[in-house]
Image: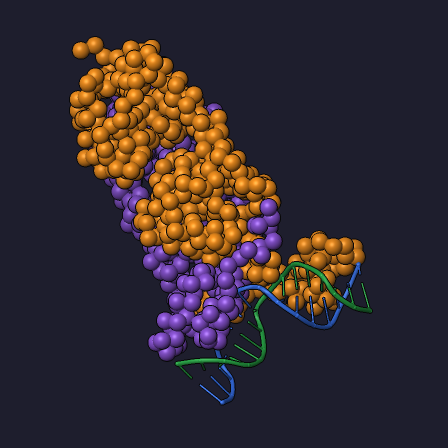
Chain colours: A purple, B orange, C blue, D green
Amino acid sequence: MTTFVDGATGGATLREVAEAAGVSVSTASRALNGQRRVRRDLVERVRAAAMQVGYQPNLAARSLRTSRTMDLGLAFGRLDTPAALDLIDGLGQGTHEGGYHLLVTSARGDATRHRDALRHLLHRRVDGLLVSRPDGIGTEIADFGRQGIPVLAMISAGEGAEDLPLVNVDLRPAFADAFQSLARHGHRAIALLTEGYGLRPPRSRRLPDGTVVRVSRLAGTASAAEVVEALRVQREADPPATALICDQRFMPTVVDVLRSWDLEFPRDVSLASYLDSRWMDELMTPPLAAIHIDVAELGVVAARMMIAWLGGEEPPPLTRLPLSRWIERPSVGAVPTL
Amino acid sequence: MTTFVDGATGGATLREVAEAAGVSVSTASRALNGQRRVRRDLVERVRAAAMQVGYQPNLAARSLRTSRTMDLGLAFGRLDTPAALDLIDGLGQGTHEGGYHLLVTSARGDATRHRDALRHLLHRRVDGLLVSRPDGIGTEIADFGRQGIPVLAMISAGEGAEDLPLVNVDLRPAFADAFQSLARHGHRAIALLTEGYGLRPPRSRRLPDGTVVRVSRLAGTASAAEVVEALRVQREADPPATALICDQRFMPTVVDVLRSWDLEFPRDVSLASYLDSRWMDELMTPPLAAIHIDVAELGVVAARMMIAWLGGEEPPPLTRLPLSRWIERPSVGAVPTL
DNA sequence: CTGAAAGCGCTTACAG
DNA sequence: CTGAAAGCGCTTACAG
């Protein structure tokens, strides 16, 4: 059985359609694509012929000719977070509306595979590339630029992608609300565990009301031990953190650590998530407060911007969408009295 | 700025590489692809030239010529479950190992978009198509067959895809373990809420030890109201269900319903999930028991089977992989005493 | 080992 | 409105 090996089985070509309809290939093409005017009856005849021979256009041939693929590439270095699903959905939506198609790729955290996937999209000549939190793929992105293929970063511009057009979310109002709410509950030291580049001493910031916010940054691949360490530092700092806002990515580990320390939320510590998901927040007991981001809508907007760009408009300026808000839930409560 | 509109910006072609290296296009091609032998120094010269002019092969041209794309398509009707991420990861892994690339597509539950995406993969001439729980896409799948493109179903064969080669998981041992465990806890009526085609009266089955298992099937898109209804029927049946095993997809709603009924697990009802996810089970309090499936490994195997098929082997027979097991956790406990 | 030539399946000026 | 012809960028028998 080598049916699929030599490709000789492939379906009908436009030429066969044209022959079946008794017209030239040019006319068949025009009839099917409805570009310039073709006589009504010929259009019908060609359509019928196409149907009858089971014609399926070959996009490789078309895009070789037109040098457009109508494809947009989306490359993930790692696809492990429920929010990624929403992003794909939103981008798919915006892409579809604009008559494009979205091709998604994931590398399971393997940097080599990620680069390989990007190179493949480049060679496939996607019309545009979308990247979420690009990091360590500067070389590949530069190749797209050299090939004349626009690249749009989403969420954040990573290393080597600093000067890409970027669409992200204005998080300030949501975080301001979160801090204010926590302060009202009596918290004076709030720890943020966010994704960043490796474990370093937390950075501190004092809000006007005296509340201290300390940020620990962890690599997305942080081990349980590293998360433990970051939490320990935050608890032992002066003043010790009584409220935690953790990147969704770390939440399984954080919950695990808190359990092993016999800490309950909100009794012993208030807990909230940066990025929410119906697979997480509402299933937890008590339900988890969160910085909510409408990631799907971000995707829709990003896709539209890319398509406008492809349509000849100026590259989109740095855009911060107001798609974030604080959602308070019972995982956040009064500061514990010692 | 119409830089990206007419595609005139595109990079160097093989011809330019050949010219820069002072060889023919044929030699340049052979040197770069390492097929037949080419003189050592020429290979070097061509490589250097390719590098220097920034050559990036055009896969549209290549696959037009070879009638192979080395792409595998993966089409989701809906991509809303954490398990889907694992499937993508596994398929990506197996695909990559075999020298292919995985192109993923999602339709956000929109049937028209799903069909459109499939047609696009068809026109893009992916070498093979992978579908998870195909349903209502029989026509599109037939088109792939007509085009000589193999299609492999995963997880389950849906309507119109009954005679596709199928790779799924042998669930019997896991369910047997689950039933046995629940029976040991004293449960005599176990309700299964699984994904199926619409709400119908539950089907009942009696195990050798007298335990009754009643299955309610719900559409994947079931509304909260429908889930409530299914749960109510199960609770009011004779005997009433005291243990629930629910498809991961319904878990957010189920937990919500139980809360609104003031039912706690495992105190009032034992709860387990069909398909687990670290985004769900371990975050819940108490942690959720589950029928675990190694979806990523399923993906790896499915990709390998597809690639073997493409390599000329016989289409894979119906395969049931032993990738499932029961994971007991504290959400399952003794039957409540009334 | 190397090169000239054909051809994959389309679209699109260019004539008519 | 329609057709003959060129050409998109590759690979691969076929000669040499």
Quarter holding the C terminus of chain A is top left
Q: Which of the 4 quarters of the picture holds residue A55? A: bottom left
Identity of the residue drawn at 52% across and 61% down = A60
Q: Residue at x 19, y 18 (%)?
A: B238
The mark tally for this picture is 0
Of residues B239 and A262, the one nearer the viewer is B239
Quarter location, residue A21: bottom left
Q: Is residue B229 visible from the viewing direction of this image?
A: yes
Asked if residue B314 lies left or right of residue B246, the reply is right
Residue B142, horizontal then vertical, whole percent = 43, 50
The foreground one among A161 and B136 is B136
Q: Is residue A251 visible?
A: no
Q: Is residue A316 above or below residue B131?
A: below
Q: Is residue B166 above or below residue B288?
A: below
Query: Image point 27% across, 26% down: which residue?
Result: B203
Relative image position of residue B22 (x, y in whole percent): 74, 67
- Counting from the top left corner in percent of width and height, residue A228 is at 43, 24
State whether residue B50 is above or below residue B243.
below
- Is the residue A157 above or below the residue A191 in the image? below
A117 to the left or right of A337: right
The residue that appears at 53% across and 47% down in the rendered structure is B101
What percent of the width, then of the height, locates residue A289?
27, 33
Viewer-proximal residue, B264 or B112? B112
Residue closest to the eye, B308 or A140: B308
